Image (spheres, rainbow, N blue to C red):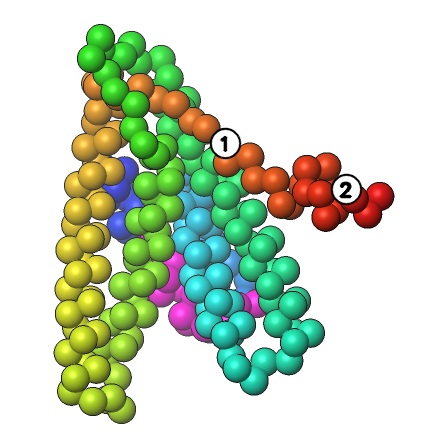
Amino acid sequence: MTFAALCNTIFPQSVLDYHKTDDVDAPMPNPYEQGTIEYDLYKKNWIDVVQWHLEDIIRDPEIDPVEALALKRRIDRSNQERTDLVERIDSYFYEKFHAVTPLPEARINTESPAWAVDRLSILHVKIYHMQEQVNRQDVSDEQHRKCADKLAVLNEQLQDMTTSITELLDDYQAGRRIMKVYRQMKMYNDPSLNPVLYGKK
C-alpha cells in the first residue's frame, strides 16, 4: 500500500467516526497505537474535521460575542496543534528519506510532503460535507446540480492529489528530489515574538 493509499484509508475513517456523534467536544476514538504514523494521520484528520465544524459554529450570525471569542481562541489553538502535527509527520518523512543521496539533477519541492498530506486530509473533509449537500432533499434542482458538479471536481482533486503525493514520495526515494523541511515558525502564538503579547510584560 502506498502512503497516499494509507491516508485515503485512515482519513475517511476519521471523518466517519467524528460524525457518529457530530460533537466538537467528543473524545477522539483513535484506533491506532500512539507513536505510529497511523495514529498521527488519524489525529491529523480528526483535528481537521473538528475545526471544520468549529468554523461553521462561529459563523452563526446570532452567536454570542463572548462565545465567539472563546471559539476563535479554540480555533487558534487547533491551528497550532495542526501545524505541530504536520511538522511531526514531516519529521517522519525526513527520517525516511534524509539518507538518500540526491541525484545531480535533483530538485527541491515547493512544499514538504506532510503539507501535501495536510491538503489531502482537508480534501476528505470537504468531500464528505459536499456529499451531504448533494444528498439533501430540501434544495432546488439548481443547487443540487451545482453541488454535484463541485463534488465531481473534489473527487478529481482527490485522484490527482493521491497521484501527486505518490510521485513526490517516489522522487524522494529515488533521489530525484531533495528532502528539506522548513518549520513554519509561526510568531503570533509565541509570547516572546508577538509584540502585542511581549509588549504587555
The magenta stretch spans residue 23: yes
Q: Which mark is residue 183?
A: 1
The answer to whether residue 35 is left or right of residue 126 is right
Q: Amino acid at mark 2?
A: Tyr
Exactly how many numbered labels are in the figure? 2
Quadrant assignment for the C terminus: top right
Q: Is residue 102 above or below residue 9?
A: above
Q: Amino acid at mark 1?
A: Arg
Query: Magenta stretch?
Result: 10-25
Residue 32: % across, % down = 43, 47
Query: According to the image, label 2 marks what residue?
Result: 198
- Inter-mark Cα distance, 1 to 2: 22 Å
Residue 139: % across, % down = 24, 88
| Residue depicted at x 22% and y 45% | 161
Q: Quadrant of residue 92?
A: top left
Which of disc 2 and disc 1 is earlier in sequence?
A: 1
Residue that extends furthest to the right in the rendered view of this protein: 201
| Residue depicted at x 50% and y 43% | 83
Callout 1 environment at 10 Å: few (<14), some (14 to 19), or many (20+)?
few
